[in-house]
Amino acid sequence: MGPQMGTEPHGICGVSPGPTARPPAALTTVRQDDVPIRSSAYAATVLSTVGGMDIRPVRPHEHDALGELTVAAYAAIDPAVVDGDGYAGELRDVAGRVADAEVLVAVDDAGTVLGGVTYVPGPDSAWAEFSEPDGAGIRMLAVAPGARGRGVGEALSRACVDRARAAGRGQILLHSTDRMAAAHRLYQRLGFARDGSLDWEPVPGFWLRGFRLRLD
């Protein structure tokens, strides 16, 4: 399996949108603590609305579109990463992520998928890159090229933070590469701090830098 990554338009292994040109619009959040993650009611739920976008769980008919969007976002960072070690197939496998994590999307009024993110609810998930028992994670954040600058990545990231708080998690962890300076500024704006103890090198010479947001 290739290095584990995540992206906004171009982030790696976690949240990674660049900063928006304007302050984010106020979020209207709907608490869904009591709705089972994989129920049809949950799939129909709008978790928040911001900037004309709905943030909600991905629906089955959107899996392919989100998979291709995610591959395209990663390829914009480094085509060699997507081409190597079958990682493009992993990025496309939205259905596989839904089976053991939560996949959220941002959609516009026409129902077009503008971006998506994988929220990892705990260390027992197959998608977890952490072992902290009170932890949650953010992975594979991707934003469509035409939707950059609209705050999509930030809205998706905040939705993950909301999910973690509602579930009583104590912290959120994610990773990014050294190239993602704009993403790092977003993390800091959301309250994440760099944590070198989380850094790891999935392949020689390729470092993933850790970030941690404590929720308690």
Image: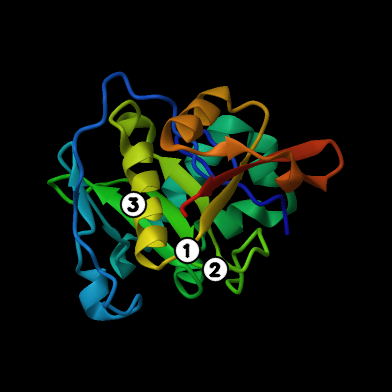
The kind of residue tagged 3 is: Ala
Inter-mark Cα distance, 2 to 1: 8 Å
Secondary structure under badge 3? helix
**Residue named by callout 3:** 159
Q: Is residue 179 left or right of residue 15?
A: right
Residue 115 visible? The answer is: no
Q: Which sits in the foreground, 46 or 91?
A: 46
- Residue sitting at the far right: 204
Mark with earlier residue (3, 2): 2
- Residue located 32% across and 25% down the image: 149
Give the answer, above or below, for where 170 lies relative to 113. below
Q: Position of residue 171 (x, y in %)?
A: 52, 55
Q: Is residue 67 above or below residue 187?
A: below
Q: Position of residue 3 (x, y in %)?
A: 71, 50
For the residue labelled by badge 2, is the local secondary structure a helix, a strand or a loop?
loop
The percent position of residue 142, horizontal first and vertical second, equals 45, 43
Mark 1 is surrounded, within 10 Å at the Cα level, by few (under 14), some (14 to 19) or many (20 or more) other residues, namely some
Dot 3 crowding, Cα within 10 Å, few <14, some 14–19, many 20+: many
Looking at the image, residue 53 sits to the left or right of residue 70; the answer is left
Residue at 40% in and 24% down = 19
- Mark 2 or mark 1: which comes first in sequence? 2
| Figure quadrant of the N terminus | bottom right
Where is mark 2, residue-wise?
Answer: 122
Check disc 2 and give the amino acid type: Gly
Nearest to viewer (mark 2 / mark 1)? 1
Contact check, label 2 and label 1, Cβ < 8 Å: yes
Residue that label 1 marks: 169
Crowding at dot 2, Cα within 10 Å, few <14 / some 14-19 / many 20+, comes out as: many
Residue drawn at (32%, 53%), measured in percent from left and top?
A: 105
Q: Are marks 3 and 2 in contact (CB under 8 Å)?
A: no
